[in-house]
């Protein structure tokens, strides 16, 4: 399943880790610099999309049109 997570706080990160362990395709969209730095240490870089998850262009870049769950 392709899951797009808006926000990489503690809950978003834990959800991403759980889904990745279950072999789902995951993308996390985050814009806060301090959170991005932590995300890059905790989850694979290819799952992280930098930008504000409330902006349509950012969500399109993260491939929201193909996401099965947001």
Image: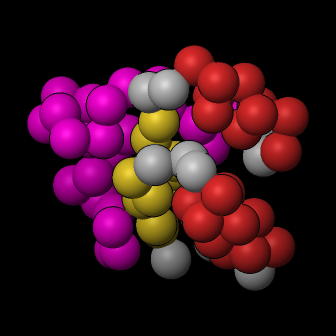
The residue under the point 72% across, 24% down is 37
Query: Residue 10: x percent and y percent?
Result: 65, 58
- Between 11 and 26, the one lying in front of the other is 11
Residue 46 in sight here: no
**Chain part drawn in magenta:** 45-70
Count of picture labels: 0
For residue 21, above or below residue 29: below
Query: Residue 47: x percent and y percent?
Result: 62, 43
- Between 31 and 70, the one lying in front of the other is 31
Q: How is the image coloured?
A: secondary structure
Query: Residue 56: x percent and y percent?
Result: 14, 36
For residue 17, above or below residue 6: below
Q: Residue furthest left?
A: 56
Taking the magenta stretch, the answer to whether it contains residue 52 is yes
Residue 39 in sight here: yes
Quarter of the figure with residue 68: bottom left
For residue 8, above or below residue 21: above
Quarter of the figure with residue 54: top left
**In the shown orientation, is residue 24 left or right of residue 53?**
right
**In the shown orientation, is residue 52 left or right of residue 23?**
left
The residue under the point 74% across, 75% down is 18
**In the shown orientation, is residue 61 left or right of residue 4?**
left
Q: Quadrant of the C terminus?
A: bottom left
- Between 49 and 54, the one lying in front of the other is 54
């Amino acid at each position: 399943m392709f899951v797009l997570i808006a926000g990489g706080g503690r809950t978003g990160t834990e959800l991403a880790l759980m889904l990745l362990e279950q072999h789902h395709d995951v993308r996390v969209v985050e814009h806060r610099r301090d959170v991005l730095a932590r995300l890059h240490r905790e989850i694979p870089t290819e799952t992280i999309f930098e930008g504000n998850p409330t902006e349509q262009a950012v969500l399109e870049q993260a491939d929201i049109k193909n996401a099965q769950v947001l």
